[in-house]
Image (cartoon, helix red, strand yellow):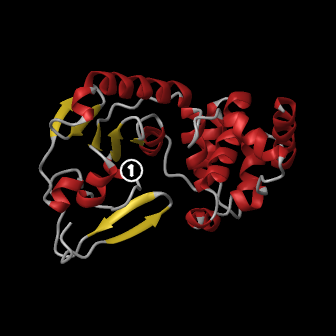
Amino acid sequence: MNSGKAILLVVLSSILVLIQPGCKPLGRFLMPDLLTGDQEWSIRETRHFLIHYRPGSPAERDMEWLATGFEKDMQTVKSYLQVDYRGKISCFIYSSIQDKRENGLVGGTTCYCMPSQQMFVAVYNPPHEVLAIGAHEIVHIVAYWTVGVHASDMLAEGIAVAVEGVYGRNTPVHSAAAELSRIGRLKSLETMFDNRAWVQLMQEDDWLYYNQAGSFVKYLVDTFGPAPFKDFYCRATMTDYRRAFSELYGRDINQVYDNWLQFLADLN
């Protein structure tokens, strides 16, 4: 990325909005290569994906496995949410963290998605540099286009972790949350539904937040089905989530939360 290009990154409700002075979006999608001039991509198209990858990279070598895996992940997402998504997602797979750091629109190791643009960025350089390969980012995009815009970061990240089943250390999400509960590290409901707390994740423990959210959301969907959750997903603001839950689930969220804690205790 040229240092002369000023890029302002604004994160609003987990949707990455990119603004570049003097640069207009080209075509329907706002792609990393269009913004940075990076054209070194080959493309593999599947039913639901346009997979961009570096020629000669590990992703090219393993493309059949990656393409099949993405489509399987898509089917898992649609089945879990019980939605009909017919769009096509553009995925940019960098060949290494160094490649992304030097050439990506957002530097460092951070991978991200733009739900409104049906796009996400990943890194594939196994065995150690594999980021955003899986269902997580796909969930964000599919939910945006079929369920709606989320009101709570906790529910947005929670459903992504719930569908994938793990976050960060390949520990099943309920097992991770059970361990966090056992050692007394779980956050309160008020904290989890406070979007301001999620903005500070890099200064705290994202593994805690994501696994707690993922486990609680998975418990909700597995216990009560996806229908009330999808409405709750769009209505649960940090000031009104209790009333929204009561209206949609016919239960008090504190009682359901306590039931979830007991579920975790039974796993220990």
Name the quarter where the N terminus is drawn: bottom left
- Amino acid bearing label 1: Cys
**Residue 212 falls left or right of residue 15:** right
Q: Position of residue 232 (x, y in %)?
A: 64, 46
Q: Secondary structure at mark 1?
A: strand
What is the total number of numbered labels drawn onto the structure image?
1
Give the position of the C terminus as an image quadrant.
top right
Is residue 86 among the parts visible in the rendering?
yes
One can see residue 46 in this view: no
User: What residue appears at the point 81 percent right and 36 percent down from the top-left corner?
Assistant: 264
- Residue 155 is situated, as x and y percent measured from the top left of the image, at 61, 48
Residue at left offset 56%, top offset 43%? 168
Which quarter of the figure has residue 58? top left
Disc 1 crowd rating (10 Å Cα; few below 14, some 14-19, many 20+) is many
Check disc 1 and report the residue beneath it.
113
**In the displayed structure image, the side of residue 66 where residue 199 appears, left or right:** right
In the image, residue 160 sits, relative to residue 63, either above or below, namely: below
Is 260 located above or below residue 9 in the figure?
above
User: Which of the pair 240/133 is nearer the observer?
Assistant: 133
Residue 262: quarter of image? top right
Position of 202 compared to 19: left or right? right
Q: Residue at x 56, y 48 (%)?
A: 156
Q: Is residue 73 above or below residue 144?
A: above
Q: Position of residue 226 (x, y in %)?
A: 62, 32
Locate residue 22: give its quadrant: bottom left
Q: Position of residue 241 (x, y in %)?
A: 71, 55
